[in-house]
Structures are given as structure tokens and as C-alpha cells.
Amino acid sequence: MTEQHLPLSDCALELIAHRFKVLSDPTRLRLLRLLMDGELSVNELVSALQATQANVSKHLGILSDSGLIARRKVGVTALYRIADPTIFTLCNIVCQSLLTRGEQTLQRLRSDDAPLES
């Protein structure tokens, strides 16, 4: 099976690099993981991450600005949710790739590994 590649302009590459930059922070990835199960409030996210509200709010703002998450107000509470469901596909692709690479590394280690004698 041959993969089709989209023609990418310099502008497109900049946008792609920005998306990966947004995803390069472990705290933002943790927030996305939490939101994959559904909407959560800032307080719930702060509690789950055991982080400060200022830090969580900063990362939520970055994720929101990038279009990955969205928020809605319910009274005085802000609820956050995944806005771009392609993040599920991207995470699955990366996780599968890491798993495959890990399995290949383990196989190489086992095949190169001679039993150690005392």
C-alpha cells in the first residue's frame, strides 16, 4: 500500500511545526489525555494534575488557541473538551509507532544478547 503525501508549502510546514510544538509539552499532553474521557472543569483538571490553577490555565489557553480544545461556560464554571477529534488519531498513530519501535528494540536486544555467565 502506497501512502499519499500532500504537497506542503512553506506556510503549511510552519503550521504543522506549530501543532507539534503545542503537543511537545507533557502537561498539555496530560490535559488532552484527561479530556479524552469528556468535559472537565479547570478545578477538576487542576486536581487531577496536582498542578497550580495558573499553570493549568496557561496550558489550556495554548491548547484552546491552537484549536485542539474548546471551552463553554456553565454559570461561573468553564468546562473544557476536545474540539479537534483528529488528536485521537494522531495519539494512536504515535503510540502504535512507539510500541512497534519498542518491540523491535526488544527483539534486537534478545537476539544480540548472549547469556551472561558468572
Image (spheres, rainbow, N blue to C red):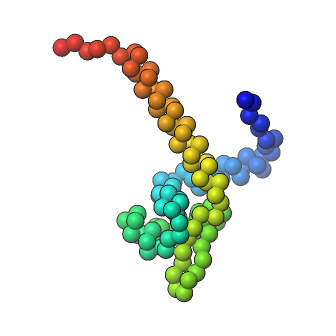
- Quarter containing the C terminus: top left
Q: Give the x, y percent position of residue 75.
A: 54, 87
Q: Is residue 7 visible?
A: yes
In the displayed structure, would residue 64 be above or below residue 113? Answer: below
Residue 54, placed above or below residue 82: below
Outermost left residue: 118
In percent of width and height, residue 33 lies at 50, 57
Q: What x and y, as percent, mark residue 40?
A: 50, 71
Residue 28 in sight in this render: no
| x then y, percent, for residue 98 | 51, 37
Q: Residue at x 59, y 43 (%)?
A: 93
The residue sitting at the bottom extreme is 75
The tally of labels here is 0
Figure quadrant of residue 72: bottom right
* Residue 67 found in image quarter: bottom right
Q: Quadrant of the N terminus?
A: top right
Asked whether 72 or 21 is in front, the reply is 72
Quarter of the view holding residue 84? bottom right
* Residue drawn at 22 percent across, 12 percent down: 117
Which residue is depicted at the point 28% across and 14% down?
115
Query: Residue drawn 66% across and 48% down?
Result: 17
Which of 111 and 29 lies nearest the eye of the viewer? 111
Left of 116 or right of it: where is 18?
right
Seen in the picture, residue 17 relative to 55 is either above or below; the reply is above
Q: Is residue 5 left or right of residue 42?
A: right
